[in-house]
Image: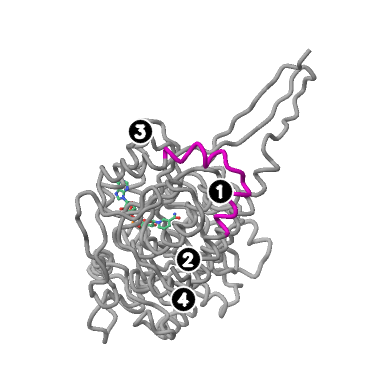
Amino acid sequence: MAHNQLHQPHQLYIAGRWCDARSGRMETVFNPATEAALAEVAVGAAQDVDDAVAAAAAAQAAWGKSTGVERAACLRAIASGVLEQQEQLARLQTANNGKPLSESLIDIGDVVATFNYYAELAEQLDTHQDQPVILPSDDFTATLRREPCGVAALIVPWNFPMVTTAWKVAPALAAGCTVVLKPSEITPLPELALAAIIDQAGLPAGVFNLITGSGAEVGAALVSHPAVRKVSFTGSTAVGQTVMRAAADDLKRVSLELGGKSAALMFADADIEQALDIVCGGIFFNAGQMCSATSRLLIERSIAEDFTARLKQRVESIKVGDPMDPATQMGPLSSRQQYRKVQQYIQQGLNAGLNVVTGGGRQPAISRGYFVAPTIFADVPFDSPLWCEEIFGPVLCINTFDSEQEAIAIANRSEYGLVATVLTSDRERASRVSAALDVGLVWVNSPQVIFPQTSWGGMKKSSIGRELGPWGLHAFQEIKHVVMAAFG
Ligand code: NAD
């Protein structure tokens, strides 16, 4: 296959081969910008999961014993395959998910960086195997080694299909795990194209497998399969809890990346222009369908009126429309279900008489597709569902504070704890507030930049464990110590 042509299979990928689902069932996936059918994709079920897990289990021993350098070569081949086809992949993801083309290209840059980063870590594993442990006794020596967990089930959502997949596949393969990937039933096309690239990357058959299908059938069968040793899941908190319960029977290792209701804290001394960009990016990027969306904006009271007015102006200039148009800044929501869910929240806000600063319904003048207008509600009560629950759409809720302590207390009053944004020109305040927030990642005067070297994940009901960085690799490894008495 020529590398500049995107291979778009719509089947399952098991033991190094494309195959139909045993049931023969197919399901339509859609373009959320036009509501048109895009493709028919195989619908896997428990028997297909058995086949994929058997293939992964058969490949595990040899892959787990391969050198880090060998595994790194495959990861680098995947990175360059993705880079070579970035334009086609971006168009495919945008067609299936609805995010603007410019955002799909950012996602692809992240995917390439992630595979290259874990290639580096895999190479280092060879030299750092059997690390000596300093003991307080000359009678013993000890070494620490990390071994692959075994077969890993990787389950991902639809909002960042290729990114969430790369954050799991790259460290799992680097660690020496074999994997079965389950994409979201809403956006399987980007992962199918990625699987076609992985197919060309030199991995032994069975190391990487992909099963499309529903969460209730494929996801549940993977999580309860006795030969799966590790489950890495990204999705909603409610499903994450179900996954954790199901994994408990075999005490499978579990990593969970779940929901959020994150806060941006805007202090009166912040740079206003910079803050407008950061606040808009934090909630309207990907039409707000981000676990890390800063969907609660806390503004210091003295500037609240002025800042809200400027924000309204800025938001009303966001170009909403065809995500394939390079000028578009916000596309549709990714599915009919998500569109309905977000509209219900907006309606709830309107029914409760909340103060609508802008938006508040469907994007005007677009007749087809799941387009919601960028929406802001001000003075949202702290007990409103719009303030407390993850809406996962372009809906920003604003409230005010009078003191730093109050801002921190309000931000922390959430069952979630994924990320936060702090906007201030006072360096000491930035450090104090960052230290006091119960979240896994704080951005100070920064857009939501993500580096593979820093961790991803949060506190409370947002996560178990961390992705990215060395922690992402450790999530797919078991620790073994060997303690030896001195030989005589
Ligand atoms: P979801 O929980 O509905 O589905 C996620 C995945 O789990 C899908 O592939 C789905 O098919 C599968 N699934 C569903 N039921 C299952 C079951 N019983 N067993 C196993 N798998 C099952 O979430 P979604 O709607 O696809 O994604 C949106 C959610 O994902 C939001 O809550 C968002 O915050 C979260 N998310 C979190 C992060 C993060 O890094 N913390 C990143 C992206 C998205």
**Residue 87, label in figure:** 4
**Residue 174, label in figure:** 1
- Kind of residue at badge 3: Pro
**Quick check: marks 4 and 1 in contact, CB under 8 Å?**
no
- Kind of residue at badge 4: Glu
Q: Residue furthest top?
A: 488
Residues 449 and 429: in front is 449
Q: Rounded to the nearest whole Å, what is the CA distance between mark 4 and mark 3?
A: 40 Å
**Quick check: marks 4 and 3 in contact, CB under 8 Å?**
no
Q: Which residue is mark 2?
A: 298
- Kind of residue at badge 1: Ala
The residue at the point 35 percent across, 30 percent down is: 249
Q: Rounded to the nearest whole Å, what is the CA distance between mark 2 and mark 1?
A: 41 Å
Instruction: Give, as a single range, the part of the protein colored magenta.
Output: 57-76
Q: Which percent across, then down, holds residue 61?
A: 50, 36
**Residue 226, label in figure:** 3
Q: Is 145 placed left or right of 277 in the picture?
A: right
- Mark 2 or mark 3: which comes first in sequence? 3
What SS does tag 2 mark? Answer: strand
Residues 58 and 377: in front is 58
